[in-house]
Image (spheres, helix red, strand yellow):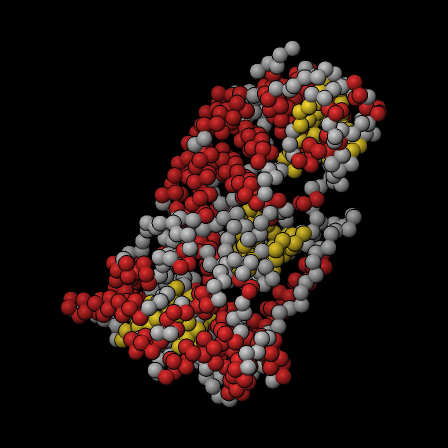
Amino acid sequence: MPWRTSAPRVLIRQLREVMARPDDSQARLNRIVKLIAANMVAEVSSIYVCHGDGSLELFATEGLRQEAVHKTRLARSEGLVGLIAERGQPISLRHAQSHPAFSYKPETGEESYRSFLGVPILRGGRALGVLTVQNAIEREYEQDEVEALQTTAMVLAEVLASGAMLNGALGPDPKRALSQTVEGATLSDGIALGHVVFHEPRIAITRLVSDDPARETARLEEALGELKQSLDGLLTHAELSRAGAHRDILEAYRMFANDQGWAKRLKESIAAGLTAEAAVERVHVDMRVKIAGGGPSSDRFLHDLDDLANRMQRILAGRSGTAASGELPKDAIVVARHMGAAELLDYDRERLRGVIIEDCGHSSHVAIVARALGVAAIGQTHGLFDMVEPNNPVVLDAEAGKLHIRPSLEVIKAFADKVRARSKRQAQYERLRDVPAVTQDKVRVSLLMNAGLTMDLQQFRDSGADGIGLYRTELQFMIASTYPTIAQQAQAYGAVLDAAEDRPVTFRALDVGGDKILPYLNHQHEENPALGWRAIRMSLDRPGLFRTQIRAMLKAARGRTLRVMAPFITDVAECRQAKALIEREMERLSKIGEPAPERVQFGAMIEVPSVVWQLPELLPLVDFISIGSNDLLQFFYAADRENPRVSARFDALSPASMRMLKTIVDQADAHGKPATVCGEMAGKPLEAMALVGLGFRSLSMAPASLGPVKAMLLSLNARHLAAALKTMVDAGEPELRRKLNEYCAANDVNIPRKDAVIAEAPAPREGEPSVSVH
């Protein structure tokens, strides 16, 4: 009997009627397999259900012996049924018993059935069971029969997932039930305990079957149109329009949204009797099955498919916003695949405890904003979405770059103690806020704060910092959808100067390009953006951008001192050109008679090794220099600090690094020019101690680092350290970090030690209650 094109819709409608009957669970399953056998023109139809240990149990059958029901069990991966569950893919065979994976179970009486078709019952990427049909004759199952059985399996998946028909037989997904630890890369230091919130919430499909295909098709087409329009808007206007990985992802989304084959398959699923939401899920599962298991590249593709399907489901549900637009728990740990800097700012800071962004590096926009907010954050947590569910309790240890999922009570207690210890130390640091940073031998060190957003200003007021040593002006540009006007820039810079009162503020001129691309500026893709068209190179090639920003700074600093420095100077000629543009804007103010700053100080950032050997020519041109240790050291060692395979291959505390930094500070002292270190080295107590030992007397760091560094300085004898450090460096000491730690221990230098490593979360014991984090 040929397969009828209307059969899937008829079968799904009949399944819905079976679900509505007041039968017990076994009677319903028995009716379901009878319906499937009749519609598929098969002599056998069976449902196998996965248990928590991975084994499969025959739960219902039409055609096999009834006494085998609830007696026949297959071990994990055993037989054709186990293979289907393990791979998550259908198997169609003319002669099943000749397949090497075939496992004969004599109690079933299946020896007389040759052809076999089985499909996984999937939900959220997890196999809940297997649905099979068999025939006595050898036959090829047609593709539309395979797809019809997959559609039926999807409807069954929702039934099995509810657990209502299984009497508790369906065990929890091991990946989503046990305690687990995921490793990532630290984006922003800190520890947070809370509950998972997905940045882009998943939509639960509650209505699978439809009696009005025309209406569902219209809903689908409307949603497809909205999806295409939203993606086009993102590609042309939103922050993610910049070149790079995010744009590639959006382009992939748009490719699928405009793919006629995808739309055709969605409409065919609706014609089979599904709702628009169920059709999206049905096609999504099918595409996932086809490309799964292809390695890292296919995993990335699967992530994109998941995101696109979820985006489509949110449009159909009328919920296109992110979690930031909804009600958050009081201890939200937000989990995202991707996130823009502006999106992070949308979250309620009182409820946001931490952030995990699967595809995110340390220097990305959102990572910079996370550090500015003081929110614990990690990135590069590949595979996380296969392990975590919304509202799962988690412990985010951004210090170690780890996320503990569904942690045991012991782990929660250990981290709670760790948080309390951190809070106690922070209270001790706060008592030092107004104490000058003077060493035991009366050496004064200026401790400055790094900033970049107006929200940093309150932290600055509370920090006790001697000033702002690095104000990253580009953050205002990065979170804006259009280029900020002179008035907007001047207002922001003026607010910073007002907050600083009589303390110095050093503005870094626009440092964009490389990995910091503004969405409203044209930019060509570069193979190596860190060494490409960025910072002062872009400003000098587009002097209008630089002059506009300088004009805003001069306006904001009327009657006050303006300190501005040029980033990424690689040649003295660049310094001369940047200084000439500033002088040109000063001359303009004089000509038009507008008020000017009382004083303008111009500086250069030392971030590229080439300029270290041009200091005798450069220093007479500037009023001060600032060392950006992050870029300087990664270029010095030719090791990308964003690449985990090479980032740990060098230590900032090595004789080579120390000698280069010593050259810089000695040259600055010889020319009477102040030198500040404003990279990450300055905010780490041991590294900061070494910098002071080299001769630096000005350090700029994140607000949270001010207390630990000041506590270290108050216990330090700077001159004694300088002599000891010189001996170590001159000798080429290969274990300089260890030696410096030994020096601290021997001389009672207050270097905060990281808390003891927390043991990995053990698997929960049988019967152990679920864990709540408060």
Q: Quadrant of residue 147?
A: top right
Query: Residue 622, position in %: x, y?
Result: 31, 75
Q: Is residue 35 visible?
A: no
Residue for point 45% across, 33% down: 257
Q: How many marks on residues?
A: 0
Q: Is residue 146 visible?
A: yes
- Using the image, determine if residue 221 lies above or below residue 410: above
- Using the image, determine if residue 24 lies above or below residue 400: above
Q: Quadrant of residue 739?
A: bottom right
Residue for point 68% across, 63% down: 758
- Using the image, determine if residue 73 lies above or below residue 342: above
Q: Left of 103 or right of it: where is 470?
A: left
Question: Which corner quadrant holds the N terminus?
Answer: top right
Q: Left of 536 or right of it: where is 331?
A: right
Query: Residue 424, position in %: x, y?
Result: 60, 71
Query: Residue 148, position in %: x, y?
Result: 61, 22
Question: Which corner quadrant holds the C terminus?
Answer: bottom right
